[in-house]
Image (cartoon, rainbow, N blue to C red):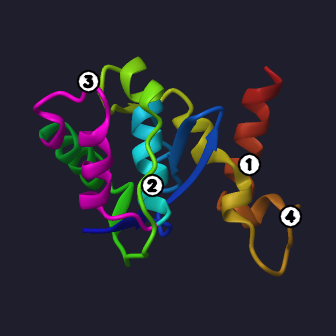
Amino acid sequence: MNYVLNEEKMFADVTDGIAIIINSETGIYYGLNGLGTAVYENLMNGVSVESILAALKALSGAPADIETRLNKFIQEMLDAELIIEGSASNSSAGIDASIASEDNFEMDVKAYDDAQELLLADPIHEVKEETGWTPEKDSIGYSKEETAKRETKVEV
């Protein structure tokens, strides 16, 4: 089985070996630990789950339940709609043994909603083609009355 990022709802970035995936519809963002990020990156490169599993099993110290752990991790990403089924490539899996052992072969997906309000309020997501990057306040979905109320609350 192969998976890709659910680009209809999500956008993602990997920085310093940690993946952050943001749901643009809900404002919830997800953080993956080091091994989870390594698996995620392999998936995004078109590597099959079977190939990733084989690479994990080949690592020194891999636990007997590594297949269960991998399947649970992938199911968590599917349940959160981070990934969807995708096409395969001939890429082979690459998993750094030090990352796997550092994370005790655990693959984590953690959801965060602490920036939800900020992410959903971002007017860039609501910019209309005709107004460009600096939309009129009306174009971001608030009436003039709603905008005036919001500006009053900010000034207080």
Question: Is residue 48 shown in magenta?
Answer: yes
Q: Residue at x 47, y 30 (%)?
A: 34
Question: Is residue 110 shown in magenta?
Answer: no
Q: Which residue is mark 2?
A: 42
Residue 6: x %, y % from top left: 43, 65
Q: Residue at x 65, y 32 (%)?
A: 16
Quadrant where the image shows the N terminus? bottom left
Circle 3: residue type:
Gly
Q: Distance between the Cα atoms at labels 4 and 3?
A: 51 Å
Q: Residue at x 43, y 76 (%)?
A: 89
Instruction: Report the mark closest to the observer, 3 or 2.
Output: 3
Q: Residue at x 74, y 48 (%)?
A: 147
Instruction: Report the mark closest to the observer, 1 or 3.
Output: 3
Residue 111: x %, y % from top left: 39, 33
Q: Which residues are magenta?
A: 46-67
- Describe the element under mark 2 as helix, strand or loop: helix
Asked if the residue under mark 4 is in contact with the one under mark 1, i.e. CB atoms within 8 Å, the reply is no
Left or right of residue 73, residue 43 in this image:
right
Q: Residues within 10 Å of mark 4 (few under 14, many from 20)?
A: few
Q: Which residue is mark 3?
A: 61
**Residue 147, disc:** 1
**Residue 133, disc:** 4
Q: Residues within 10 Å of mark 1 (few under 14, many from 20)?
A: some
- Describe the element under mark 1 as helix, strand or loop: helix
Circle 1: residue type:
Thr
- Write down the quadrant of residue 95 in the picture: top left
Q: Earlier in the sequence, mark 1 or mark 3?
A: 3
Residue nearer the viewer, 151 or 130: 130
**Location of residue 140 with respect to 155 vertically, above or below:** below
